[in-house]
Structure formats: C-alpha cells, structure tokens
Amino acid sequence: KIIILDFGSQTTQLIGRRIRELNVYCEIVPYNKFPRGDESVKGVILSGSPFSVYDASAFKVSLDEIRGRYPILGICYGAQFISYSNGGRVEPAGSREYGRAHLSSFDRNNILFNGVKENTQVWMSHGDTITAIPDNFKRIASTDKVAIAAYQVEGEKIWGVQFHPEVFHSEDGTQMLRNFVVEVCGCGQNWSAASFVDTTVAELKEQVGNDRVILGLSGGVDSSVAAVLLNRAIGKNLTCIFVDHGLLRKDEFKNVMHDYECLGLNVIGVDASAKFFKDLEGVTDPEQKRKIIGRDFIEVFDAEAHKITDARWLAQGTIYPDRIESLNITGKTIKSHHNVGGLPEEMNLKLCEPLQWLFKDEVRRVGRELGMPEHLITRHPFPGPGLAVRILGDITPEKVSILQNADDIFIQGLRDWQVKDANGNETSLYHQVWQAGVILLPVQSVGVMGDERTYERAVALRAVTSTDAMTADWAHLPYEFLGKVSNDIINKVKGVNRVTYDISSKPPSTIEWE
Ligand code: XMP
C-alpha cells in the first residue's frame, strides 16, 4: 500500500481517491503518524498544506525514518518541504500562482513522466515557490512561470512536484501518480470491489464468529451496503434497526423497509415520530434541533438494542472520509454534523465498521458487486436530522407533510427528466446532481388562484453538483424543468403559492439552509 502523509491540504483526500481509482490501496494519515513497522507500505506521498514552510505553525516532521526506505513523492508543500529541509530555497511567489499552467519542458526520460504528453496541462495552487534546489537535486520540469515545477533527488527515489497531479485539471496527473505508485513503488493494481467483498466477508466471519451484531440503518447508501455485506457474512446473526423520526421523505420509511426486506435483511422498523415531534415542539434554533434529534435517536435506538440481549457488536456504515483524522486548522465548528454518536458505553458492544477504508464511490461499487438495486446505490445523500433542517423555524407535522409533498414532486421530477450526459448516454437530472431537496421557508406571500387572493407559504428548491459535499455549485437545471416543477408544486401542494430556486454555491453558502 501507499501512505499519504497529510499536511492539511484541501486536496489530500483527492490524492487518495486517484490512487484508489488506479486500483491501488492507500491510506491517509496525519503527517506525524507514519505507521512504523507496517511491512505492506511500498511508498509515501507528502501532501500539500495551507501553510508556508516559514510559518511558525507549519507542520514539520523528520523524514529520516522514511528516506532511503521507501520511494517518496512530495506534492506542492510536500515538495517545498523536502527541498527546504535539505537546504533549498523557498520564497513567496510574486503573485499567488493559481490555476492552469503547462509543462513547457520536462525530462522525457524520467520515469515520473512516462506516457505524459508534451506541454501537458497541470494545475497550480501555491503562495510560495521553490526558487533554488540543493545541489544533489535535479530539475525535471518547468512551466513558463515556475522554473522548478518538478525535481528528483539524484541517485534516490525522491520526487517533488510543485503542481497538483491529483486534481482533475492536471490532464496527465493520474498518469504521473500511476508512474509513481506502480512503476516506482511496484504496487499491484488489484484493489477492486470484488476482491474487497471476498476479503471483507472472510474477515467479518473471522472477527464476529457466531456473535450477534446490531446495525442502525438510515436508508442511505453507506449503512445499507454495510448491512448487505454483513448479511452475506453472518446472515441471521445480524439484526438491523431502522428508526423513523418522522422527518424522512414522503413514504421513505415504507419504501426503504420494503427494499430491505427484499434484500433478505432482518430489520426492525421503529416508528418514533410522535416522540420526536413532541420534543421538537416550538424549537427554532438549528443546532438545538440537531441536538434534540441526536439525543432522541440514541434513546430510541438504545431501547430497541437493549431488547436484543445477546448482541455483542454494533456495526456502523462509517466510511473513510468520516474517519480521516482531520488536522483541525481553524478550530471552529461550522455545523455539528454526524449527530448520531453511537450507544452509551454501558452497553459494552464492540464496534464493527466494515466500510471504514472506503470512499463513497467505492462503497457504491461494492453495493453493485453485492447486487443491490440501483435506486438504493445512487440515492442522494440525506442529512441525519432529515427534513428538520429544511423547515426553517419550528416543526409541526403539518409543515412536514407540506414539505414532503413538495419535495416528492421535485425529486420525482428530477428522476423523470431525461438528458444526455457528456458521453451522449441517456441519464436523468437526478443522476446529474449530487443532492437535491426542497426547503420550507418561514415566509408567507400573496398570490391569486382563480378569483381568490391567497396568502400561503413559499418554498425554495435546492439542487447542487459536488464530488464530496465540501464544495458545491448550484445545479444549472433547465428553465423548462424548473417551470414545470414550480407549476406542479403550486397546483398540487395545498398551502404553497410561491416557488424559488436557490442559486448559491458552497462556500460561502452551505448545501442545507440550517
Ligand atoms: P452543508 O449544509 O454543511 O452539508 O453544506 C454538507 C452535507 O452534509 C449533510 N448534512 C448533514 N448530515 N447530519 C448529517 O448526517 C447533519 O446534521 C447534517 N447537516 C448537513 C448535507 O445534507 C450535505 O450532504
């Protein structure tokens, strides 16, 4: 495997994803937590960082243990750091170098550039630049603006690149990463969904034996794939619990329960909506809503789990991005996500997280490998607190019902609207957006229906494109589609007389409104 030392760059996860896409296994660890003594490590990548090597708080680490033992590739800050700590010079770039650039010259014979096109486009994003490299470093690429765009340490398997090969706009970036992990480090390209399923099923059998496992299902992709995988390993010794907090999409509880039963899962469905509605009554603060829902969820789940007296394990659909130990750079919580914090300790359950090393796209591939239905696998992400964070202001069953009806029209509309993708294949708008939903606004406005004046609610449609929910753009949905949805909602959903479309991107907005 490849180890990626994370120095805090926003694109560190992308490095991991690109390498996994090459079917090579890799792990991302904080810059100072190299897994000593792990014999499966074949190479190390140093990520970028928001810091300059001169910042007092910059992340620094001794490379003595790694150098000479493993091939190393430094990316952006990683490259600056290796050069600087060997006596090279790094200086602020005149203006921040950001965006597209071309490798106007590079060493064709260097293994890092095998199969790379002449003048290939790369993506730059750095405030500092390497202005001089130590004597035993050799420059191997330049752009018009950046003389030392890449280097290799002579006689050693150490490379540094100033650009970001992991981002989409670096045309041959994946090829360069492949050259490093496959040609230089000698990693096999055998990490696939099928091999993951085989090894994980065997490992789960070993880990859990004949013990009973309980798992909380949410209807989302991650927990569903975790359940099907466990079901394959231990069958009826898996008990799933699906709590309905009353804030799911229209008919979702019923539909998802049906899907789970078709998949042969042993599921207990708990309708706890009355409790959630009671505890949320009159609450308007978003964080307060999240806290109440998180607490109630644990209470309800806990009560059900206690009935299963022989349970020894709690399984969760945690995936890799949820776990990657984040280097907390700003120290601020923007929103408290992931409110479902697990069970109280006294239950004494051991934790089983079979998807903990997978990225979202890999979870989907595993789901397909397991033969799960496509509509479960391609389902949009949905927030844990559900429609509670899409009803601005206090929550009542009546508002939930209005929102469910409007949301259902929007989502069904996205599914039904056929378009061609970039390759000319038929797809739907639903598959082209990352996530979509309707927001119920705390606003009433005047309208006219027939001869009557109305004074009813306004809703906002929200649809975004994204790859990881960290950044997102508003989806440029066709006007005709928006017009149809608006018409349908106003005509069919009693209580709504105005529809707006949210055209904010993240940042500075967020995907949800609360
Ligand atoms: P934001 O609104 O922060 O959302 O741009 C990013 C992603 O996270 C989801 N989200 C949540 N998921 N509990 C969750 O499990 C939450 O409290 C929560 N808030 C937001 C959101 O739907 C989007 O996919």
Image: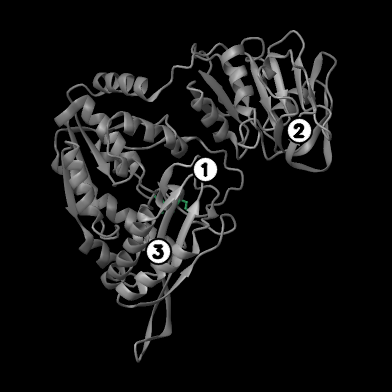
Q: Is mark 3 on a helix, strand or loop?
A: strand
Dot in front, 3 or 1: 1
Q: In this view, does 155 lie above or below 418?
A: above
Q: What element carries label 2?
A: strand
Quadrant of residue 180 within the rendered picture: top right
The residue positioned farthest toward the top in the image shown: 155
Indicate yes or no: mark 3 CB to ligand 1 under 8 Å.
Answer: no
- The amino acid type of the residue labelled 1 equals Ala
Mark 3 — residue?
438
> From the viewer's perspective, is 435 left or right of 122?
left
**Label drawn at residue 386:** none
Mark 2 — residue?
102
- The amino acid type of the residue labelled 3 equals Val
Label 3: few (<14), some (14–19) or many (≥20) C-alpha neighbours in 10 Å: many
Dot in front, 1 or 2: 1
Q: Residue at x 44, y 39 (%)?
A: 322
Indicate yes or no: mark 2 CB to ligand 1 under 8 Å.
Answer: no
Among numbered discs 2 and 3, the one appearing first in the sequence: 2
Residue 329 picture location, percent across and down: 61, 43
Indicate yes or no: mark 1 CB to ligand 1 under 8 Å.
Answer: no
* Circle 2/circle 3 CB separation < 8 Å: no
Mark 1 — residue?
422
Among numbered discs 3 and 1, the one appearing first in the sequence: 1
